[in-house]
Amino acid sequence: MSEAVLELKDIKKSYGQHKVLKGVNMTVNKGDIYGLVGKNGAGKTTLFKVVLGLSHYESGTISLFGGKNRKENTRNRSRIGFFVGSNFYGYLNARENLDYFRRLKGIREKEEVDRVLELVGLNMDAAKKPAKMYSLGMKQRLGLANAMLGNPELLIFDEPTNGLDPQGIMDVRHMIQRVNEEFGTTIIVSSHILGELEHTAHRFGIVHEGILMKEMSQEDMQTQSGMTSINVADEDVEKALELLKNGGINVKGTEKAATSLEDFYFGLIGGGEQ
């Protein structure tokens, strides 16, 4: 049985009269790369802030690493690294910023700064520039590096590929997979790029208008697609088509098809645009 790192039960959160989270139930298991899917305003960032203790919620329960009450959850939040936007001192370079946060977090190993810089692909030249000179993409990388200081057990990344070019997006995907595989780190990541998230995450949660509508694994997505595929070797395609036709089955065409996360998402919430 999988060990739950994070469990949310019936979490509700409002800003004034606006209900942002409407009874969210969510489970993230140890070792998951969990992809949180939803358009702007769906409640993803608010959900992260509630988990991190940065925003209060009206009702429901949260359990972090098995925590049974708010006191235990508060203590267990020290085991989380998070990237929800980036906020650095512009006059300090990457290394100086990270060294400041290393000391703030009580991490004694100075070499930890070099480790996370290497993980996010900020080379020596970039690490020497003042943060105010960084592009949005470089700031994103620096924020990810800060989140990973101290090798936390759970990482939360809110839109980590925002502002990155295609190569940068692929680099972040490989970094997430590497950290998960090498260190066994559980990772929750949100993204608007559903195709990229599909290639990164093991499990998915689909949030729409403050409700987590569905949780599923990669395997679940294919099983619930309503389609069945029959695989044959390329050299046997013509033979298979002939057998089907002889059996009275009208074959209109052949194609290599698979259900994408984007197809499943829009099929669930309705519509075809984010």
Image (cartoon, rainbow, N blue to C red):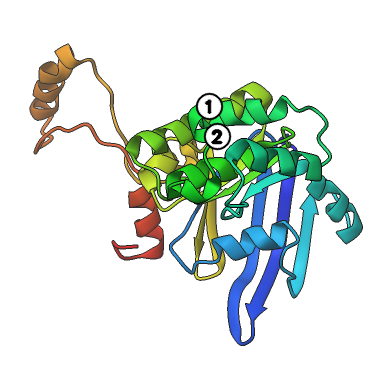
| Discs 1, 2 touching: Cβ within 8 Å | yes
The image's mark for residue 124 is: 1
Numbered disc 1: secondary structure: helix
Of residue 76 and residue 146, the one placed in the foreground of this image is: 146
Of residue 1 and residue 73, the one placed in the foreground of this image is: 73
The quadrant of the image that shows the N terminus is top right
The residue depicted at 55 percent of the width and 34 percent of the height is 128
Q: Residues within 10 Å of mark 1 (few under 14, many from 20)?
A: few
Q: Residue 17: which quarter of the image?
A: bottom right
The quadrant of the image that shows the C terminus is bottom left
x and y, in percent, of residue 100 in the image: 73, 43
Instruction: Give the residue at the far front of this rendering.
Output: 91
The image's mark for residue 235 is: none
Tag 2: residue type? Lys
In the displayed structure, does residue 253 sit left or right of residue 217?
A: left
Q: Residue 249: which quarter of the image?
A: top left
x and y, in percent, of residue 264 in the image: 38, 51
In the displayed structure, does residue 94 sit left or right of residue 274?
A: right
Residue 222 seen from this side: no
In the image, is residue 125 above or below residue 37? above
The residue depicted at 59 percent of the width and 41 percent of the height is 93
Of residue 195 and residue 92, the one placed in the foreground of this image is: 92
Numbered disc 2: secondary structure: loop
For label 2, the residue is: 128
